[in-house]
Image: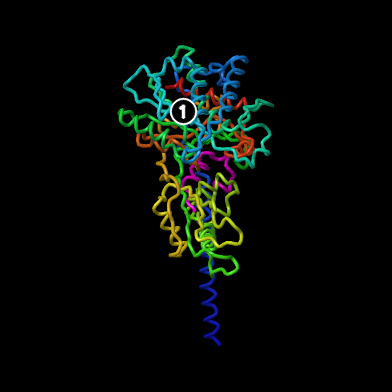
Amino acid sequence: MDSFTSLAHSFKSRLWLLTKITLLGLFCLTAIVLINTYRFTSSDMSVSIYTNSETPNPNGNVLMTRTKEESAEVVDRLSKAIQFPTVSVRGQADANFDAFADFTGFLEQSYPRIFQELEITKFNNHGLLLHWQGSDSTQKPILLLAHSDVVPVPKNQLSQWNHPPFGGVVENGFIHGRGALDDKASLLGLLEAVDWHLKQGTTPTRSVYLAFGHDEEVGGQNGAVAIAQYLETQGVSFEFVLDEGSYITQGLVPNISERVVHIGPGEKGYLSLKIIATSDAGHSSKPPKITAAGRVAMAVAKIQSTPFPVDLTYTAEFVRGLGKDAPFIQRLVMANAWLFEPIAHWIMPPIPELRATMRTTVAPTMLAGSGVDNVLPNHASAVVNYRILPGDSIEQVIERTRKIINDPQVELEIYGQASEPSKISGTTESGYQLIAQSIQETVGDEAIKISPMIMIGATDARHYEHLTEQSYRFVGLTLNRELIRGFHGVNEKVAIESYLESIRFYQHLLNKL
């Protein structure tokens, strides 16, 4: 009995010791997590405001504003630009090249100062490179990008548009139509800003190049790629490159009602894989165990049910930029990614744009089989689109997909063009700082939240990476959830005041060069 009592006491002592060690460990872990969260701020992304030679008016806009009549003319030019159906089609066989030629003629007529005073080079008839010579040839130039092409409007969506997609209707403070956001507001905004400076008689210190591709929506081979190859042969490299891609948002970041600026320091890679299976054709009344369509469907189901692992590297930088205004749970997770990364997908808010920065994404987009319901297809296929997070690669994605499918009767081939993830540019570099300062001056608020957020789509900027160490994506338009749905969707439109503000951003940026 004494031996049993002694054993029981020993067990209780050891259990109590284990409990104390566990509690102490939990206390230390909690302390570490909370300290990390408290110190998770944006101090390393600070921006020095108003460093240009002119001190702006307190509202940030007086030096760059237009009269009411001038603003109306600016709006009218964008409205007219939208009316050119510059639709790019993969393969370009069905592209309306007359519309592209007419659009270029419209630009020449609308901005005669630019086409008279800047050096203009055309590529494959419709791509444009504009060179604005600076006063100091010892400084590296910058490159500003946009594209003139737009995506098609499917016929089955026409009835859902409130205004004709290529009508350029101006109503209730908005300019409506395909390309209003992607990307004619950017293209014309750049031209408006350059034209404004030419009218003032100002010349930038460093040279400025503007490159406008005409096939960005289908890969950029005839536009951006051709222009980049030409610039390389000329020995031109850039201090930084700025393209479309990121915006100012309002109402998208939880718990932050004010506007938040997103600057893209890089972009995800692009890959589409075609999943192919074959089998004997025949009557559907006597099917094999697995049809070609069934085999493809099983492969797609496996791919979609096996997401890539979470990597919080780039999402954390965005949340860090928001500082203490970011929701506590987000700061908690991002500051302690080593602990929460495996479960972050379930903890973070269901914001598609935010979640897309956390991993390589997978999206089945196209399916093809028999053209008749009672005929077995001898060939079936699906296309799965991947947006590749930096750190992954095209080769890794293909190999991982092959292992997930694990079926030797399924073939994989790259569909269309593919591109690796871009390199990531720094937030302390000159380009990021100039962009951020110009934003602050435009909105007249040095406290506005500015944070890097990796671009989840693909842009022409990737084709110029070898010509610069700094590449960013930002357009000074303010968007909410409704407006974002217009990208490649229905009822695309841009707010007039937002468009005018985006032009002032370009004016401020050019003013600082």
Q: Is residue 332 above or below residue 16?
A: above
Q: As drawn, is 422 to the left or to the right of 287?
A: left
Magenta stretch in the rendered image? 310-331
Looking at the picture, how far across and down is residue 237, in whole percent?
34, 30
Q: As drawn, is 114 to the left or to the right of 445?
A: left
- Residue at the disc numbered 1: 48
Q: In this view, does 115 lie above or below 396?
A: above
Looking at the picture, how far across and down is residue 136, in whole percent?
34, 18
Specify whether residue 24 is in view: no
Task: Look at the image and say whether residue 142 sits in the magenta stretch.
Answer: no
Looking at the picture, how far across and down is residue 276, in whole percent?
47, 58
Quarter the C terminus occupies? top left
- SS type, badge 1: loop
Question: Is residue 386 or residue 165 the one in the foreground?
Answer: 165
For the point 45% across and 49% down, the residue is 415
Residue that extends furthest to the front in the rendered view of this protein = 282
Which residue type carries mark 1? Ser
Quarter the N terminus occupies? bottom right
Looking at the picture, how far across and down is residue 125, in whole percent?
43, 28
Residue that extends furthest to the bottom in the rendered view of this protein = 1
For the point 51% across and 58% down, the residue is 380
Question: Is residue 93 or residue 62 the one in the foreground?
Answer: 93
The secondary structure that dominates the magenta segment is helix
